[in-house]
Image (cartoon, helix red, strand yellow):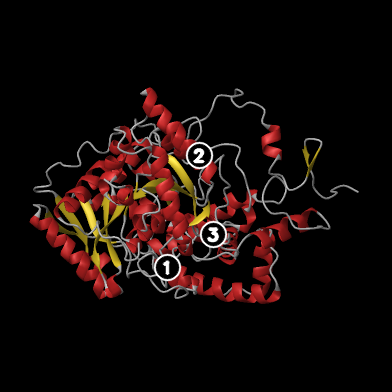
Amino acid sequence: MALTSQDIDRIANLARLELSPEKSERMRTQLNDFFGMVAQMQAVDTSGIEPLTHPVAVLQDVQLRLQGDVVTETNQREAYLRNAPAAEQGLFLVPKVIE
Amino acid sequence: MSTQDLHHLSIAALAAQIRNHQTSATEVAQHFLARAKARQALGAFLAVDEGVTLAQAKAQDAAIAAGTAGPLAGVPIGHKDVFVTRDFPTTASSRMLAGYRSPFDATVVTRLAEAGCVTLGKLSCDEFAMGNGNESAAIAPVGMDAPAPVRNPWDPGRVPGGSSGGSAAAVAARMVAAATGTDTGGSIRQPASFCGITGIKPTYGRASRYGMIAYASSLDQAGPMARSAQDCALLLSVMCGPDVQRDSTSLDIPAENFTRQLDADIEGLRIGVPAEFFADGLADDVRSAVDAALKEYEKLGAKLVPVQLPRTQLSVPAYYIISPAEASSNLSRFDGVRYGHRTAHPADLQELYKKSRSEGFGDEVQRRIMIGAYVLSEGYYDAYYLQAQKIRRLIANDFQAAFQQCDVIAGPVAPSVAWQLGDKADPLSSYLADVFTLPASLAGLPAMSLPVGTGAGGLPVGLQLIGNYLQEARLLNLAHRFQQATDFHLPSPSDI
């Protein structure tokens, strides 16, 4: 089942990317080639197999840690705003969202 | 020793000379900075700052005088540009992060600095570490006015490998004594192999990911790239260790001295040789060099044992589903608002996101984000992402079965030597070239590459060693014994 140009538009929207028509067409060809290669995966019988999310879980029980609900960082607002493409009065600027 | 030869010293020897005042951290830094400047045509560095480097060197000289110096005082190192650094810009080789200045240092950077390493600069890589030829770098290297791929010091018409290509080229060309790299699907091992150096990716979770710009978080792992196993062992000992407050997947296992068993006997050690790594598609010149290396190990007393890794081929689709899925999630943070590229005059918020991301990310990054967004989308998650995660477990289980019969697994790192710039423009052909490094990545196992000979055109060939979880010291031991018995790791590229 090959991806259509509508599929590419839909995925690009999900990914918040804007593709030119030429780029979109090239993407469609490349993704279809790619998913052609991926198809070999579907033939593998994985019934009863637990998905592996943390590789070391094969070795030992791995529990993702939770941090205590305490403040550990100092306020670094200025340091972080320095990299903002648009900031004013200590705030990040975005285009108007509510009319 | 004349300062002319400082760049040929091992890290242990260089650190000893600095500590014993035969030279100084400042003299060493100046020497390596001059070498880096003379070799800018390789495109390895994305940022240098002589002032910062010399100030760090001066501080190390002062620490030595005060008797407070760390074990690697004055050793010049370059950092792959995915490690954030306060004192240098960090871009991940992407237009998206051009000029970005991190407010903090990555844990790995901090640990190496605390041990005394002096930072020579930031090293080029594939954009967001996605690639294996370093051709997708989108930031102009130092001394150039447009983005350029890193060139292989052994043949400037060829790629250095990737994604840690700048790191590998800088070490091979003796512009740094060592470099950091990151390995998600082979990004330390393959460029180490292509550039004739030694590099190791430790067990997933050994080195902190804090401050490493994320590509695929369940796979990303930092490691050292240097000229010998001994050098790598010294660096790895400093880089690893728990960072449980800052990295949720950091293993809570004490740091190790990875040099402690470098010289251990390997008599009777069982080296597993997976037939799947020697199937069709492996270039003859790589096969001969790897076969010769295995014979050398037999001479050293090891035993070769055939093992099976039957799902080796499946590692390609599994990896190229899982890593883009994680990448699409990780890279969603680039929104043109808090940092990174922002498009000019967006009409609304959606346009701000879409145009900023499309202008900031290169083609390969956009492709992987698209793949990831698709395989995680409703209706496709089970068929792709979940299936890939199940195959990931089968691949990890295959390794455990193989390790019932052997202590270490050995094989080629890549199917060929370094290819010509531009030769893998087709994404799929480039993905397939990762087939031998992906299995260990998916399983989270430690793995390394060491130079074991040359192939066509005198280009380096690496041998891959894969160990069971937490067996880094064993891998380094095997590599060190090989390097004691042979000299494949010693030659430097001509004109270098």
Distance from the alpha carbon under mark 3 to that under mark 1: 15 Å
The amino acid pointed to by label 1 is Val
Say if residue A52 shows up in the picture.
Answer: no
Which mark lies nearer to you, 2 or 3? 3
* Tags 2 and 3 both on a single chain: yes
Q: In 3D space, how far apart are the residues under numbered discs 2 and 3 (Cα atoms)?
A: 22 Å
Q: Is residue B223 visible?
A: yes
Farthest residue in the front direction?
A: B2
Give whichever of discs 3 and 1 has the lower sequence position.
3
In this view, the residue in front, B56 or A43, is: B56
Which disc, if any, is residue B106? 2
Tell whether label 1 touches label 2 (CB within 8 Å): no
Residue pictured at 60% horizontal, 76% vertical = A26
Which residue is nearer to you in this view: B59 or B47? Answer: B59
Disc 3 target residue = B141
Give the residue type at disc 2: Ala
